[in-house]
Amino acid sequence: MRVKYSLSIVCLALLGCGESHTKEETSDAGPDSGISFDGGAFDGAVDAGPSCGNGVLEAGEQCDDGNGDNDDQCTSACERTAFCGDGNKEGAEVCDDGNNASGDGCRADCGSDETCGNGIRDVAKGELCDDMNMVGNDLCSADCKAVTGCGNGNVDTGETCDDTNTDRYDGCGPDCLDEAAVVVNSVALAVPTKGCDYSGDGKPDNAFSSSLGIARGILNSTFIEPAVAMGQILIVMDFRALDDKAGVNDSSVSVAWFQGVDADQNANNNFSGNGTFRIPQAGVDGDGNAKVAFTSSIENKALTGGPEDVTIPFLPGVTLVLRRSEVQATTKASGGSLSGLDKGLLCGAISIPTLALIPNLAMQFGGESVPCDGGGGNAGTLLDQVVGGSDLFILQIAATQPDADLDGDGLEYFEVDADGPFGCQPVISACVDGDGTRVEGRDCYLDPSITMADGFSAALDFTAVGATIVGVQ
């Protein structure tokens, strides 16, 4: 079944079918933007130099925590101190390969080089154990991929189960630990006051929800929530190497992230606590290891994990890539086993290239809008709408610049053409990289001479209930 919507209602409530954008009008982009906009659109360059230290993250800055202390996460020059994923191995980092993905030789949190024998159980690399050696006549095999004695039918020391095999998805994992999984039963774009801290000021950032304003609630209630209820959005989280099967305290657990498949094709029982799901073949490598997993810990039921790059459903047929994302939630248990998650929050940054692939909301809902630059074709993408702003009949999408420096060269920003006929959509007219490189054109972010890789902070609330993974599809 597909969700059907009334175009006239959506156009009236969300898109408003147009108001003019003129440079004489003013729009407050919100307290977190630190950038002034005219007519709901950014128009021209921003000089970030003299304003470093004012506590407002601005174009060209990597951070701004409002002080001149060089011993915190943001220097007096508004540059981020070393962080995992910047490509530089510094401080306590064991490695840093420039991303936040596990299984590629450097764990997502830069805390392991993912080699057998380092004493760290690197689940993303397929390790089931790691006893700090590569000797095969002890409790861990020489390649760290087998637990000696697992599968013999006896629950030995370090095991919570043993069903005489080392198969996965039969209730007892190949490491002889109870398998535990949950399925997300509610998800929504979070309020602007929830998110990760990208500015370095110790406060949460959520530029995406701030830009959407009241439209955030309409997107949640009209699209996202119904899609979850009808099984069109299925997110399954698989807890691997969970030593405490109740999920109360565990210093190291890997939480795999999958877009699941309903095993019995019955959406009515997905969130019963006994729903069965398969995970897509694309979500695992040739050895069955999850391609995306949060390196996590649980302390007194408080789950924290990340950073990790994840893909999440946004609208029907539309997905978002959330960079450097973090997850937190409160675990629930029933009968001594993990049974769900409450108060979940997934936060990260939606990259510029991701928003550029999504049609603007007017087109997404079947409407049309004229680009302000007078050029042919459609009114651009969701990136144009977020960066340029959009006047609506009832609501307004506030013009918002990227606020998450994902490539470490300072914040990038866009120039926007907002002059045009009544009801036109402001569109991008130029891109300015964090290093100052400027390229003109509506599709400037595609120019190979510039790297527009930053993003917009975002966050989602979620809850999850118990689930069973029955195989790979």
Image: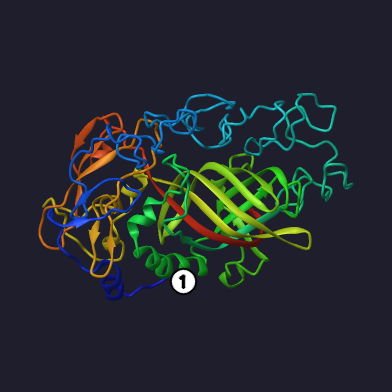
For residue 402, above or below residue 268: above
Callout 1 amino acid: Met
Left/right placement of residue 38 relative to residue 461 reads: left
Is residue 473 visible in the rendered structure shown here? no
Left/right placement of residue 300 relative to residue 197 reads: right
Residue shown at the point (51%, 59%) measured from the top left? 461
Q: Nearer the viewer, residue 78 or 269?
A: 78
For residue 13, above or below residue 58: below
Residue shown at the point (78%, 30%) measured from the top left? 141
Residue shown at the point (51%, 37%) measured from the top left? 100
State the image coordinates of residue 274 (x, y, percent, origin top left): 68, 66
State the image coordinates of residue 101 (x, y, percent, origin top left): 53, 37
State the image coordinates of residue 361 (x, y, percent, origin top left): 30, 60
Circle 1: element type: loop
Q: Nearer the viewer, residue 3 or 79?
A: 79
- How many marks the image carries: the answer is 1
Label 1 sits on residue: 1
Is residue 238 visible in the rendered structure shown here? yes
Label 1 crowd bin: few (<14), some (14–19), many (20+), radius 10 Å: few
Q: Hey, which quadrant is residue 112 in on the image? A: top right
Q: Hey, which quadrant is residue 171 in on the image? A: bottom right
